[in-house]
Image (cartoon, rainbow, N blue to C red):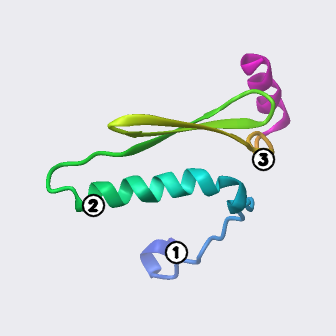
Amino acid sequence: MSEIASGAVSEVTVSKPAIDLKSHKEFMGKLIELYGDLFVHDGYGDMRIEMKILRRGQKEVIIHCGKQYRYVMDCDQALSNESPLKALLKRDILA
């Protein structure tokens, strides 16, 4: 009998890399500002976030909310959790 069928499902914890929120202060401020504007707006609103891995251990983060707000942030752990082969292939593609 499976664990799910017997009701004995165990929790799985996944360790996530720590993020220095101080370096993301400007981005988080804009995100909160845009969310507040959308929430008080008396109509329909739409917001989405797009992230791309760039060269040299950076990520591009774009907030789409009527306009596009683009941020480029350092991200040392962008390729660190992948297999060495996959990381090398991505580095070659991104170079």
> Separation of disc 2 and disc 3 at Cα?
33 Å
User: Which secondary structure, mark 2?
Assistant: helix
Q: Residue at x 77, y 23 (%)?
A: 89
The image quadrant of residue 61 is: top right
Q: Does the magenta stretch mainly form a helix, a strand or a loop?
A: helix
Q: Which mark is residue 3?
A: 1
At label 2, the amino acid type is Phe
Q: Residue at x 60, y 52 (%)?
A: 26
Q: Is the residue 91 above or below the residue 32 in the image?
A: above
Q: Residue at x 52, y 74 (%)?
A: 3
At label 3, the amino acid type is Gln
Q: Is residue 1 visible?
A: no
> Separation of disc 1 and disc 3 at Cα?
34 Å
Q: Name the N-terminal-most of marks 1 and 3.
A: 1
> Which region shows up in magenta?
83-95
For this view, does 41 lie left or right of residue 32? left
Q: Which mark is residue 77?
A: 3
Q: Residue at x 76, y 27 (%)?
A: 55
Q: Name the N-terminal-most of marks 2 and 3.
A: 2
Q: Nearer the viewer, mark 1 or mark 3?
A: 3
- The residue that label 2 is drawn on is 39
Q: Residues within 10 Å of mark 3 (few under 14, many from 20)?
A: few
Q: Position of residue 4 (x, y in %)?
A: 46, 73
The image quadrant of residue 38 is: bottom left
Q: Is residue 92 magenta?
A: yes
Q: Which mark is residue 60?
A: none
Q: Position of residue 71 (x, y in %)?
A: 60, 39
